[in-house]
Amino acid sequence: MTPPSSPLLRQRGTADGNRVAMVELFFDLVFVFAVTQLSHTLLEHLTLQGALRTLLLFLAVWWLWIFTSWVTNWLDPDRTPVRVMLFALMLGGLLLSSSIPQAFEERGLMFGAVFAAMQVGRTVFFAVAMRGHHRVLHENFVRIALWLMISGAFWVAGGLAEETTRVTLWVAAVAIEYFGPALYFYVPGMGRSSTVDWDVDGHHLAERCALFVIIALGESILVTGATFAGQIWTTPTVAAFVVAFLGSVAMWWIYFDTGAERASHRIAHSSDPGRQARLAYTYLHLLIIAGVIVCAVADELVLAHPGHFEGDGRAAMAAMIGGPMLYLLGVALFKWVCNERRGPPLSHCAGIVLLAALAPAALAHLLSPLALGTATTLILVIVAAWETIALRRA
């Protein structure tokens, strides 16, 4: 086997080269905290403005994590320089996560500056490490670094600006970051990258994203357990606890029973894994993780008030119905892209329609929070059972 062109690159095609390293799992612990901060921030600001601002922060957190996963797909985390880089990112990630609740208040500069430093610093590290060793990867990451330097300027400027201007600048920063891969990081005079150049280890990247789904689901279970422990244990709260747990199990089943493994096999044997990794894992997993976070917020709302909605309840209803819808939509598109179906799974589409059908009854206050939570969980269980039975028969 030809050795890697740089001592920092993974040795592809070996068991050790394809595995997720322990230091990568250690790195992910920071994002358990980040996901918790995001769900609590959304719960405390459960309005349209609060949801949009939390979405903006979530897009940043996800982008930071997925870009690092792409980098460690190439770099060997067991090499000391790479480990040190990951530890530095962990420190930055803790600072970033700690600033999430006040990111649009007094800690805006902390969030913006740390995010920009992490994105640019990690990318420059990779570009420098590949110089003189791997021309294609070096040029790719020089392009990426230039894009991230531009977006980083917007992140820092937003952190220095007043509240309204901050939102505008950060939206521009997110747009630059998210359009970069779609435009192949085109740079005048340097051209653009191609998905063939993004020769990722499909199995490794699939496993990394599956682990992030576990992180999000684990945070949901932690929220459920912590909230339930602080409640008076009555019949409604116990029922809400069981419903929340079954909902988490159903979400796990929908993603992991067959979809994750089949998608991993597909990308591992793809002739252009970079293209599939960009769409299925970099972009579409956004919907999946967002759905889990919103479901965690919904579970906490039901546990706190199983018998009645606070106020008009519209925000809580939106979270309780919208969370499962986001999750099913994300998983449906993910399975459609990865399994080359003619369309998304029928079971998932039916689940989205059934969830939408709950909205009129919820808005008319015909369903209590516990009843609505039970209905959404039942729909998720139906989707999981439907797909499992259909695939077993096939």
Image: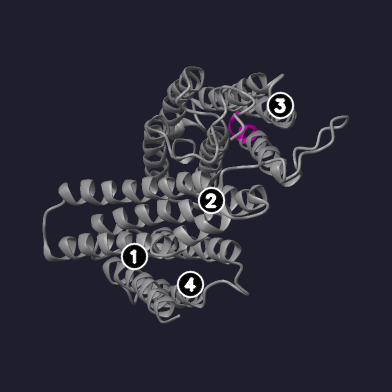
Q: Which residue type does callout 4 highlight?
A: His
Colour mapping: one colour
Q: Main secondary structure of the magenta part?
A: helix
The magenta region covers: 162-166
**224 shown above or below 152:** below
Q: CA distance from mark 2 to mark 4?
A: 17 Å
Q: Check disc 1 and report the residue beneath it.
A: 250
Q: Check disc 3 and report the residue beneath it.
A: 138
* Residue shown at 49% from the left, 76% from the top: 353
Tell me the SS state at disc 1: helix
Looking at this view, is 70 or 351 the one in front?
70
Q: Is residue 161 visible?
A: no
Tell me the SS state at disc 2: helix
Tell me the SS state at disc 4: helix
Label 3 or label 2, whichever lies nearer to me, is 3
What is the residue that sits farthest to the bottom in this orientation?
393
Q: Which residue type does callout 1 highlight?
A: Ala
Which numbered disc flags the more N-terminal residue, 3 or 2?
Answer: 3
Q: Position of residue 167 (x, y in %)?
A: 61, 37
